[in-house]
C-alpha cells in the first residue's frame, strides 16, 4: 500500500538491526521518507543502498545529548516534516542476578533505554506538534515492563518507565493531535538477544530453538499499522507475544 503523502517522514532510532531496520524497510517500501538513526555507519550505509533515496542515514548515539541536539537541528529540509517518531533503540545486558551483575551494564541500560528515549522524544516533539493531527510516537517497550522474571532487574524496570512515560505523554499532548503508543513485544528473534548474551551464539540459539518467536518484520508491520490508523484513533498500548510463549507459575523457594 502506497503512502498518501510522500513528504511525510518517520524518524527511527536503533535502525541498524532488528526491529529498527525492519521498520525502516517497511515504511520506505510504502512511500514514506525515513530517517534511520544508529551508531554503526556501515550498517546504515548498507540500508541506504538497499532502500534508496527515501532513506536518510543518520549516524548518532542516542545517549549523546549534544550530538542528538545537533543532529535533529541539522535535518535536511526534504526530511524535516516529521510525522512519526519510533523510539526503538534499546538493549538488555546480561541475565545474571542483580547482586552479581555489572553496575556498568545497569548504567548503559538506563542511559539507552530511558535517557536516550527522552532525548529523542523531547527533540522531535516540536516537529510532531507542528505536524498536528495524524502525527505519532511509537515507543518500543517490552513485556518485561509488565511482568517480572529473574535477571530482568534494570532492563524490566527501564521498560516499565517507557510504559508510564508513554501514558504520561498522552496526557501532556492532549489537544495537539499527536498520538502515543507503547508496543510491548515478548520473545523476539533479533540481534537484541545476541547483544544480551555478549555474542554467545550457543545461548542465543538455545533461547529460540523450536520456539517460533516473533520476527522483526512482525513488529515493523505492527508499528506501521499503529501509525496509519485514522487520525482520531490512538492505540495506547499493545502487548504482543508469540503463540508459543505464555506466563510461568510463581516461583517458590522450598526449604
Image (cartoon, rainbow, N blue to C red):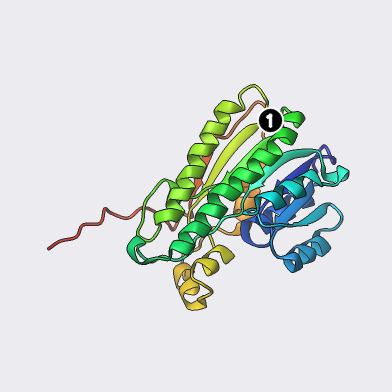
> Is 28 left, or right, of 117 in this rendering?
right
Q: What is the quadrant of the C terminus in the image?
A: bottom left
Q: Residue 106: x percent and y percent?
A: 46, 59
Vertical arrangement, residue 229 with respect to residue 96, above or below: above
Quadrant containing the N terminus is top right
Closer to the camera in the image, 146 or 240:
146
- Residue identifier under label 1: 230
Q: Is residue 100 left or right of residue 189?
A: left
Is residue 49 visible in the rendered image? The answer is yes
Say which residue appears at 65% left-offset and 62% top-offset.
17
What residue sits 64% from the left and 21% below the top? 175
Left or right: 108, with 251 as reference point? right
Residue 228 at least partly seen:
no
**Which percent across, then down, holds residue 253?**
19, 60
Looking at the image, which residue is at 54% across and 48% down?
Answer: 114
- Quarter-of-image position of residue 179: top right
Amino acid at each position: 500500500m502506497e503512502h498518501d503523502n510522500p513528504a511525510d517522514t518517520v524518524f527511527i532510532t536503533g535502525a541498524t538491526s532488528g526491529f529498527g531496520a525492519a521498520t525502516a524497510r517497511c515504511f520506505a517500501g510504502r512511500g514514506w521518507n525515513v530517517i534511520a538513526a544508529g551508531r554503526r555507519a556501515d550498517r546504515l550505509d548498507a540500508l541506504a543502498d538497499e532502500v534508496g533515496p527515501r532513506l536518510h542515514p543518520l549516524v548518532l548515539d542516542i545517549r549523546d545529548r549534544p550530538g542528538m541536539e545537533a543532529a535533529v537541528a541539522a535535518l535536511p529540509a526534504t526530511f524535516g516534516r516529521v510525522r512519526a517518531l519510533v523510539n526503538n533503540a534499546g538493549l538488555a545486558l546480561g541475565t545474571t542476578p542483580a547482586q552479581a551483575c555489572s553496575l556498568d551494564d545497569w548504567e548503559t541500560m538506563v542511559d539507552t533505554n530511558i535517557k536516550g528515549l527522552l532525548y529523542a522524544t523531547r527533540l522531535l516533539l516540536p516537529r510532531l506538534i507542528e505536524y498536528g493531527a495524524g502525527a505519532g510516537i511509537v515507543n518500543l517497550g517490552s513485556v518485561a515492563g509488565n511482568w517480572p522474571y529473574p535477571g530482568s532487574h534494570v532492563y524490566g524496570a527501564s521498560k516499565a518507565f517507557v510504559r508510564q512515560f508513554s501514558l504520561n505523554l498522552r496526557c501532556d499532548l492532549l489537544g495537539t493531535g499527536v498520538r502515543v503508543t507503547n508496543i510491548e513485544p515478548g520473545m523476539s528473534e533479533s540481534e537484541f538477544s545476541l547483544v544480551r548474551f555478549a555474542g554467545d551464539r550457543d545461548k542465543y540459539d538455545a533461547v529460540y530453538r523450536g520456539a517460533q518467536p516473533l520476527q522483526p518484520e512482525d513488529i515493523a508491520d505492527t508499528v506501521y499499522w499503529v501509525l496509519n490508523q485514522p487520525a482520531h484513533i490512538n492505540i495506547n498500548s499493545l502487548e504482543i507475544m508469540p503463540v508459543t510463549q505464555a506466563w510461568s507459575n510463581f516461583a517458590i523457594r522450598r526449604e
